[in-house]
Amino acid sequence: MNWKFTRPGRIRFEAGEPFCHLLPLRTDLLEDVQPRWQPLSEAPELEAQYRQWTRSRGHFLGELPDPQSQAAREQWQRGYFRGVDAHGCPAPQHRTRLRLPPFTRD
């Protein structure tokens, strides 16, 4: 969930209404990552996938204003949510649901 507060005031959440998503990460995992900048052109397969996605997204957004189009009927591209690439192939480690243990009280 992303909240953008644009002016001072109060925000009210009803009982039981979700207001945040906690994503616990081990800090050592983040500290052990060594980021590296690399031009996309040095990864031709990834660059091809990116260009195909860009074309697909552009086509979808171009059709969206037409109420008779497939894009307007779908309203949003669901590939990311479903965990499939531009060809419809599943991403190996994609998960749509995590089954995490509940919080406990000490």
Image (cartoon, helix red, strand yellow):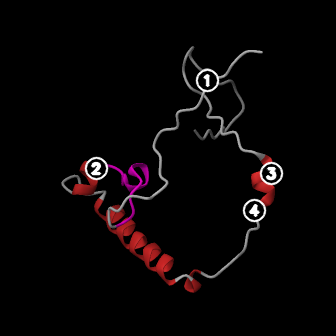
Residue topped by disc 4: 33
Q: Amino acid at mark 2?
A: Glu
Camera-nearest label, 3 or 2: 3
Counting from the top left corner in percent of width and height, residue 34 is at 76, 67
Q: Amino acid at mark 1?
A: Pro
Q: Amino acid at mark 4?
A: Val
In three-dimensional space, the C-alpha distance between marks 4 and 1, rounded to whole angstroms, equals 29 Å
Q: Is residue 86 left or right of residue 34?
A: left
Q: Are marks 2 and 4 in contact (CB under 8 Å)?
A: no
Residue topped by disc 3: 28
Residue topped by disc 1: 102
Q: Considering depth in this image, is 89 or 52 the residue closer to the camera?
A: 89
Q: State which region is magenta.
A: 74-86
Camera-nearest label, 2 or 4: 4
Counting from the top left corner in percent of width and height, residue 25 is at 71, 44
The C terminus is located in which quarter? top right
The N terminus is located in which quarter? top right
Say what secondary structure mark 2 lies in: helix
Whether residue 22 appears in magenta in the rendering, the answer is no
Q: Which mark is residue 73?
A: none
Counting from the top left corner in percent of width and height, residue 86 is at 36, 66
Q: Are marks 4 and 3 in contact (CB under 8 Å)?
A: no
